[in-house]
Image: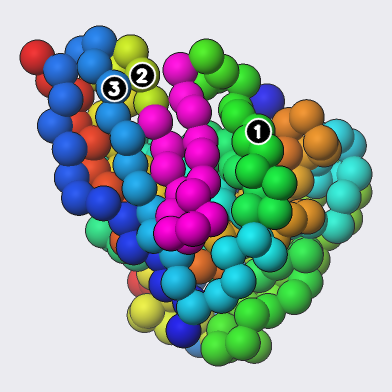
C-alpha cells in the first residue's frame, strides 16, 4: 500500500489560512469517509486533529477544519498561530485488507 | 482519563527481537483496538498494524508480515508488539494508539518507545 501524497511543506503568516492536501485513490481516500489528520510537534507523539473527514475532537480549535473531494482530502487551518507550526499527517482507511495508510507528511511553517 | 503507557527504550543487535508493551487505562479495553505506528529518525509515520481489543485478531502491514506479532492481554489491559529479525532500518520510535474498531481514528497515543538497532 503506497503512502498518501501530501505537499512536503506549506507556510503562511500569522492570521492567514493555509490548506494541506492529501491525495490517495478510490481504494482509500475516495472510497471511505474515514480520513483523519494528526499534528506532531518535534519530539512529541502525534495528536488527533480531525477524524471522519470533517469531525473535530473536543478541545481542538474550530480554526482546524477538514474536507474531501474525490480522492483528495484537505486540512485547512484558519487564523494561523505560531503554535500551529508542526508536522501534519493525514491517514485514510483503505479497506479490510489494507486497513490504514498514512500520508507522507507536511511541515507547516508560520512565517 | 484515557492513558497509554509504553515500556522503555531498547537497544538491540541486528537479528535480535524486541517486544514493546502498551498499558491501557481509563476505558473499556475490549471496546477499542490498538494500532502500532513507527517513525524512523527524521521520517514520517508508518502504520504497522492493529489488533482488535474485542476479538484479539491482528492485521499487519504487508511490509512487516512474517516479522511482527501483535497481541493483547485483556486481564492486564496491555497490548504488545514484537518485531523479530531486527535490522538497522528498524531503528525508530514505536507508538501505540487507541483505534476504534472501524475507521482510521487514533484518538489517544502512548508516549513512544525508542528502539535502536546497532551492532
C-alpha gap between disc 2 and disc 1: 16 Å
Residue projecting furthest to the front: B75
Q: Find out whether residue B103 is within the magenta segment.
A: no
Label number found at residue B17: 3
Check disc 1: other Cα within 10 Å, few if <14, some if 14-19, many if 20+.
some
Can residue A40 be seen from the camera position used here? Answer: no
Mainly helix, strand or loop, the magenta region? strand
Can residue A1 be seen from the camera position used here? Answer: yes
- Disc 2 target residue: B84
Say if A13 sits above or below A6 in the image.
Answer: below
Picture coordinates of residue B3 (x, y %)?
A: 42, 72
Q: Nearer the viewer, residue B74 or A44?
A: B74
Check disc 3: other Cα within 10 Å, few if <14, some if 14-19, many if 20+.
some
A46 on left or right of A63 = left
Q: Nearer the viewer, residue A82 or B37?
A: B37
B44 on left or right of B31 = left
Contact, CB < 8 Å: mark 3 with mark 2?
yes
Check disc 2: other Cα within 10 Å, few if <14, some if 14-19, many if 20+.
some
The residue tagged with tag 1: helix, strand or loop? strand
Picture coordinates of residue A98 (x, y %)?
A: 73, 31
Quadrant location of the C terminus of chain B in the rendered image: top left
- Disc 1 target residue: B59
C-alpha gap between disc 3 and disc 2: 4 Å
- Which of disc 2 and disc 3 is earlier in sequence? 3
Q: Find out whether residue B78 is within the magenta segment.
A: yes
Q: Which residues are magenta?
A: B67-82
Picture residue at 51% right of the left edge, 21% below the top? B64
Picture residue at 37% right of the left edge, 79% below the top? A83
The chain identifier of the residue carrying mark 1 reads: B
Marker count (numbered): 3
Amino acid at each position: 500500500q503506497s503512502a498518501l501524497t501530501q505537499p512536503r511543506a506549506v507556510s503562511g503568516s500569522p492570521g492567514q489560512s493555509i490548506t494541506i492536501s492529501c491525495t490517495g485513490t478510490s481504494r482509500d481516500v475516495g472510497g471511505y469517509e474515514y480520513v483523519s489528520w494528526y499534528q506532531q510537534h518535534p519530539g512529541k507523539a502525534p495528536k488527533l486533529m480531525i477524524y471522519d473527514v470533517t469531525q473535530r475532537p473536543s478541545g481542538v480549535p474550530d480554526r482546524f477544519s477538514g474536507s474531501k473531494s474525490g480522492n483528495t482530502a484537505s486540512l485547512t487551518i484558519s487564523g494561523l498561530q505560531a503554535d500551529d507550526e508542526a508536522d501534519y499527517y493525514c491517514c485514510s482507511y483503505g479497506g479490510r485488507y489494507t486497513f490504514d495508510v498514512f500520508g507522507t507528511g507536511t511541515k507547516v511553517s508560520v512565517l | 482519563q484515557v492513558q497509554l503507557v509504553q515500556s522503555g527504550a531498547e537497544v538491540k543487535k541486528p537479528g535480535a527481537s524486541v517486544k514493546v508493551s502498551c498499558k491501557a487505562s481509563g476505558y473499556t479495553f475490549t471496546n477499542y483496538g490498538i494500532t502500532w505506528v513507527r517513525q524512523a529518525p527524521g521520517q514520517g509515520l508508518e502504520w504497522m498494524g492493529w489488533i482488535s481489543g474485542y476479538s484479539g485478531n491482528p492485521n499487519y502491514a504487508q511490509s512487516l508480515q512474517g516479522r511482527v506479532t501483535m497481541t493483547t492481554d485483556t486481564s492486564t489491559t496491555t497490548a504488545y508488539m514484537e518485531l523479530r529479525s531486527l535490522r538497522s532500518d528498524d531503528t525508530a520510535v514505536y507508538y501505540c494508539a487507541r483505534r476504534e474498531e472501524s475507521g482510521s481514528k487514533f484518538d489517544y497515543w502512548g508516549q513512544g518507545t525508542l528502539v535502536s538497532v546497532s551492532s
